[in-house]
Image (cartoon, grey):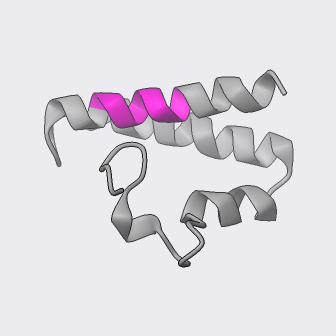
Amino acid sequence: MSDQVNNPKHYALFADGTQAIDIIQASLTCEEFAGYLKGNCIKYRLRAGNKDNLQQDIDKANWYANKLEEIINE
């Protein structure tokens, strides 16, 4: 199921559901991946409402913040 925030169809790379973020995470150290997530969170908050709709950008920023919290607490 495609969802622009939690499961964007354009990032599904393989039939098994592998997303671009899964490959990015596997390619980076934990510290690098945390920086990537933090940077994307900041990016979506800064541009909120300027590219896509405001709520979608805020939701995407929150998605990255939640993912960052998740990996920090592992």
Task: Give the residue drawn at x 60%, y 72%.
Answer: 16
Position of 27 with respect to 38 (left or right) is right
| Residue 69: percent from left, percent from top | 67, 23
Considering every residue shown, the one lying at the far bottom of the view is: 14
Q: Position of residue 18 (x, y in %)?
A: 60, 67
Tell me where the magenta segment starts and ends, as one range: 58-65
Left or right of 48 on screen, residue 11:
right
User: Where's the C terminus, which quadrant?
Assistant: top right
Q: Is residue 66 above or below residue 3?
A: above
Q: Is residue 47 depicted above or below 74 in this figure?
A: below
- Residue shown at 65%/30% (left/top)? 68
Q: Is residue 7 toward the left or the right of residue 30 in the image?
A: left
Looking at this view, is 43 or 21 the one in front?
Answer: 21
Q: Is residue 37 above or below residue 46?
A: below
Q: Where, quadrant-wise, is the N terminus in this rendering? A: bottom left
Residue 62 lies in the magenta-colored region? yes
Q: Is residue 48 visible from the viewing direction of this image?
A: no
Does 17 sit left or right of 7 as displayed?
Answer: right
Residue 28 in the image, given as x and y percentages of width and height: 80, 57
